[in-house]
Amino acid sequence: MQKIDMLSMAQKEWEEILKQWGEPTFRAKQIFDWLHKKYVTEIDDMTNIPKNLREKLKQYGTITGVKQVKKLVSQIDGTIKYLFEIEGGLVIESVLMRYHYGNTACISTQAGCRMGCKFCASTLEGVERNLTAGEMLSQIYEMQKDSGERISNVVLMGSGEPLDNYGNVLRFIHLANDERGLCLGQRHITLSTCALVEKIYNLLEEDLQITLAVSLHAPNDEIRQSIMPIAKKYSMEEVLKACKEYSDKTKRRITFEYALIKGINDSDSCAQELASKLHNMLCHVNLIPVNTVKERNYIKSSEERVQKFAQIIEKKGIEVTVRRKLGSDIDAACGQLRRSYQRNNKI
């Protein structure tokens, strides 16, 4: 018998379950509060739930969350990187980043990733499994409990391709947005994707107000295909067309992520070509000096080259930012801590 994944259930779903069990539906709010406001991990801690109902919950349900394995705190900027264990003994990463406007949690949506981007450590072992909506929420809850601080922004930008785990990610967004739980505004949620075009069109129909961040990382198909295998399936033209339709319908600005790799995609001509393709779109470009991955041979662009690249794009009337590097002393880039743990523990 497959048990109910309690942390992934909406309050209305609990009402239906309780009706089927012959229990009063007001218990649904109590259960939901324990899970999403008090962050309990044990059913017996739900002290205002009658013992017979708690026993039924234990028989038919389970609270499947994450457990902290390792924690690294940056001495430079206070960024905290967590290594969490999920069901099955697998490990994932999450990062708590502090900004002047509030705390941001970068969470994982899969254990590993099957997209194969050559500059990312998360893809080296492929994908092990999808995370449930509850496991995504649990990363946030555990970081809030550990830090004692409220998380006001979430980026689905850890390991995994969110749109490759579409159903669970969509459920997570609605649960995180629920005013009876985390009450996180959709505009405070960013979904980062390497551009699964058909899923972007699906997302377009969901009537969401989240921020879509698209990993572009190249100005043309030739370069993009050399560093991102997914580009062999979806051309730049297809990707940009889907993004344009998404921003036109949602009125939400698209963020284009661009990891600058020395000698690969950081030339003046690359910047000019990129700007020419984005000039008529509601968007901004987020430049990211690529992180060093020991298993790869890519080198990040110099600070001077990054600034010159940014200037060229900005002169074309496109808003551009250079990502502030956080947690540089604790391997805060995607997949690095998890990869190190796997090597040391031979997972």
Image (tube, helix red, strand yellow):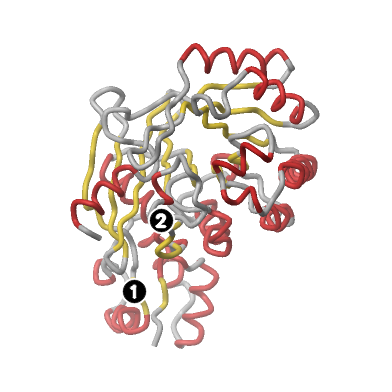
Give the residue at the far left of this rendering: 344
Q: Quadrant of residue 202?
A: bottom right
Q: Label 2 amino acid?
A: Gly
- Give percent across and percent down for residue 347: 25, 60
Instruction: Tell me if residue 322 comes above or below residue 292 in the rendering.
Output: above
Q: Nearer the viewer, mark 2 or mark 1?
A: 2
Disc 2 crowd rating (10 Å Cα; few below 14, some 14-19, many 20+) is many
Residue depicted at 29% across the width and 82% down the height: 55
Q: Position of residue 121 (x, y in %)?
A: 39, 45
* Nearer the observer, 341 or 60: 341
Image coordinates of residue 325 in percent, x first then y, are 40, 25
Quick one: SS at disc 2? strand
Amino acid under disc 1: Thr
Residue matched to label 2: 112
Q: Residue at x 42, y 26 (%)?
A: 99
Q: Quadrant of the N terminus?
A: bottom left
Tell me where residue 69 appears, x and y as whole percent.
22, 52
Residue sitting nearer the eye, 71 or 125: 125
Badge 2 vs badge 1, beta-carbon distance below 8 Å: no
Taking the spot 28% from the left edge, 40% from the top edge, the residue there is 148
Residue drawn at 38 percent across, 39 percent down:
150
Tell me the CA gap for discs 2 and 1. Answer: 24 Å
| Nearer to us in this view, 28 or 174 | 174
Q: Secondary structure at mark 1?
A: strand
Q: Is 44 left or right of 319, judged from the image as shown?
A: left
Vertical placement of residue 184 versus 265, above or below? below
Q: Is residue 70 found left or right of 228 in the rendered image?
A: left
Report whether 249 appears left or right of 28.
Answer: right
Establish if 30 lies above or below 111. Answer: below
The foreground one among 265 and 7 is 265
Circle 1 residue? 62
